[in-house]
Image (spheres, grey):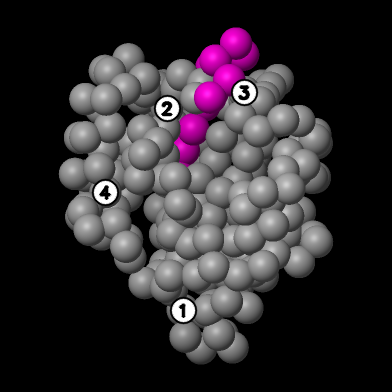
Amino acid sequence: MHRVNAYVGLGANVGDARATLTAAEHVLAALPGVRLRGVSDLYATRPVGVTDQPGFLNAVVALSVPADPDAETAALALLIGLKEIERAFGRQRRGRWGPRELDLDLLVFGRHRLHVERPPDARSADGSKGPAGLWLTVPHPEAHQRLFVLAPLSDLARWLSPPGWGETVDTARARQEVIEGPDAVRPIGRWDGSEWTASA
């Protein structure tokens, strides 16, 4: 069976976000055929887009996932699993950039560049009728401009150069730190195998 490394972003800012992300990590690791490869630090991050809301907690997990029978089918299967997890954690339909009980984004899927229509059960819960809601684009089209993604992703794959980026994750992170400022993201926990423990 052909396998690829996939990176999934996690975020939440409703309720006990830390507990939600911890539980979601365990559910992700238990998805059929999935092997957990790594978990980033946990970050407290400033909201982007809609700033009048609580701050977020964000992390990234690295997964080894099946890529058969083809990359598009396999990526959509993983995305459907992500959306099922969001719904199980009570994800509500709100406007884009708004509060999230749980947000799971497929950031990178091996070396593949994909743009494929999402089936109904893989569509965004924010009700978007635009590309974000109807299409899966991988690598995630906005990840290279989001420090709340780049900081945890660089914990796991700093030298990765996702298809189409033309730069490494670490380089993108350094650029966004200048743009967004040093207080945009703050590490607050390190994964110990079962939960994020407070950073020293």
Q: Quick check: is 148 in the magenta stretch?
A: no
Helix, strand, or loop for circle 2? strand
**Mark 4 vs 1, N-terminal side:** 1
Residue type beneath disc 2 = Tyr
**Mark 3 vs 4, N-terminal side:** 3
Mark 4 — residue?
Answer: 169
Q: Give the range drawn in magenta.
A: 49-61
Residue found at x 53% / y 55%: 106
Q: In this view, does 79 lie to the left or right of 163?
A: right
Q: Nearer the viewer, residue 172 or 66?
A: 172
Helix, strand, or loop for circle 3? loop
Residue type beneath disc 1 = Arg
Q: In this view, does 193 lie to the left or right of 91?
A: left
* Quarter assignment of residue 98: top right
Does residue 132 sit above or below 162 in this rendering?
above
At which x and y percent is residue 25?
Answer: 58, 46
Crowd rating for badge 3 (residues with CA inside 10 Å; few <14, some 14–19, many 20+) = many
Does residue 75 sit above or below 58 in this rendering?
below
Q: Name the disc covering residue 3, or none.
A: 1
**Mark 4 vs 2, N-terminal side:** 2
At which x and y percent is residue 135?
Answer: 63, 60
Q: Name the disc covering residue 43, or none.
A: 2
Asked whether the viewer can see residue 200, the reply is no
Residue occupying the far front of the picture: 130
Residue type beneath disc 3 = Asn
At which x and y percent is residue 51?
Answer: 54, 15
Mark 3 — residue?
Answer: 13
At which x and y percent is residue 116?
Answer: 60, 70
Crowd rating for badge 1 (residues with CA inside 10 Å; few <14, some 14–19, many 20+) = some
